[in-house]
């Protein structure tokens, strides 16, 4: 409500973007999209807003619209938001069926970060490309690192660890 009041009185791009982030975090993706677009009308160059709109469009199952936004942000800052934008871009490429480019994007993220989300999705692509040994290596890393992660990180990553366990069970058959 405070942000809505500031927007009403000041109409600043960053307020619209912050409101979009709140909506996004609460799963109100249509409202988030509207807020991000309002922010871009006021400041079309803001990297965070462009990246967040791209991620929002991806979650709305509109990867074709998300791709140019995410791609543009990564051209300007390849490590934007600690490679979270690069992960969204790789997910976008996967959703569009551009698996070779998605594979390269995931490999880039995994080479620079230890995110279970990236390692598991890279493993899934390896499996789709019939490369089980490469997939197994990524999944083993996720499962080996998980017990040593801080509690907050284990909670955040549990969905990916669970997915890694499921994929490992399939590989063992």
Image (cartoon, helix red, strand yellow):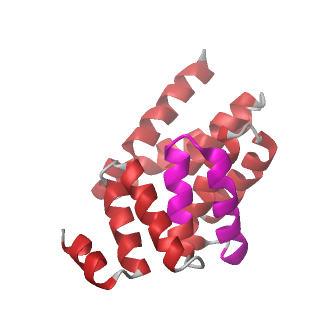
Res. 121 image quadrant: top right
**Quadrant where the N terminus is found in the figure:** bottom left
**Quadrant where the C terminus is found in the figure:** top right
Query: Is 143 in front, or is 48?
Result: 48
Residue drawn at the location 52% of the way across and 60% of the way down = 53
Relative horizontal placement of residue 56, taking residue 118 as reference (left or right): left
Overall secondary structure of the magenta section? helix
Relative horizontal placement of residue 130, taking residue 118 as reference (left or right): right
Res. 95 image quadrant: top right
Residue drawn at the location 35% of the way across and 77% of the way down = 15
* As drawn, 82 above or below 107: below
Residue 127, given in percent of the width and then of the height, sits at 70, 30
- Report the residue that reaches farthest toward the bottom: 10
Q: Is residue 114 visible?
A: no
Residue 93, given in percent of the width and then of the height, sits at 70, 46
Residue 147, given in percent of the width and then of the height, sits at 38, 48
Residue 154, given in percent of the width and then of the height, sits at 35, 50
Query: Is 159 in front, or is 78?
Result: 78
Q: Which residues are magenta?
A: 51-77
* As drawn, 140 above or below 14: above
- Report the residue that reaches farthest toward the top: 173
Residue drawn at the location 37% of the way across and 64% of the way down = 21
Residue drawn at the location 64% of the way across and 35% of the way down = 124
* As drawn, 60 above or below 163: below
Query: Residue 46 magenta-drawn?
Result: no
- Report the residue that reaches farthest toward the left: 1
């Amino acid at each position: 409500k405070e942000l809505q009041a500031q927007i009403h009185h000041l109409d600043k791009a960053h307020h619209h973007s912050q409101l979009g982030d709140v909506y996004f975090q609460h799963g109100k993706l249509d409202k988030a999209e509207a807020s991000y677009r309002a922010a871009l009308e006021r400041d079309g160059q803001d990297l965070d807003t462009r990246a967040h709109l791209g991620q929002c469009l991806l979650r709305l199952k509109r990867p074709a619209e998300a791709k140019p936004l995410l791609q543009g942000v990564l051209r300007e800052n390849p490590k934007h938001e600690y490679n979270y934008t690069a992960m969204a871009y790789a997910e976008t490429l996967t959703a569009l069926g551009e698996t070779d480019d998605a594979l390269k994007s995931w490999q880039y993220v995994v080479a620079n970060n230890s995110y279970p989300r990236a390692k598991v999705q890279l493993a899934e692509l390896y499996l789709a490309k019939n490369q089980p040994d490469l997939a197994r290596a990524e999944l083993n890393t996720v499962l080996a690192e998980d017990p040593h992660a801080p509690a907050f990180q284990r909670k955040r990553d549990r969905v990916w660890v669970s997915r890694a366990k499921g994929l490992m069970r399939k590989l063992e058959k």
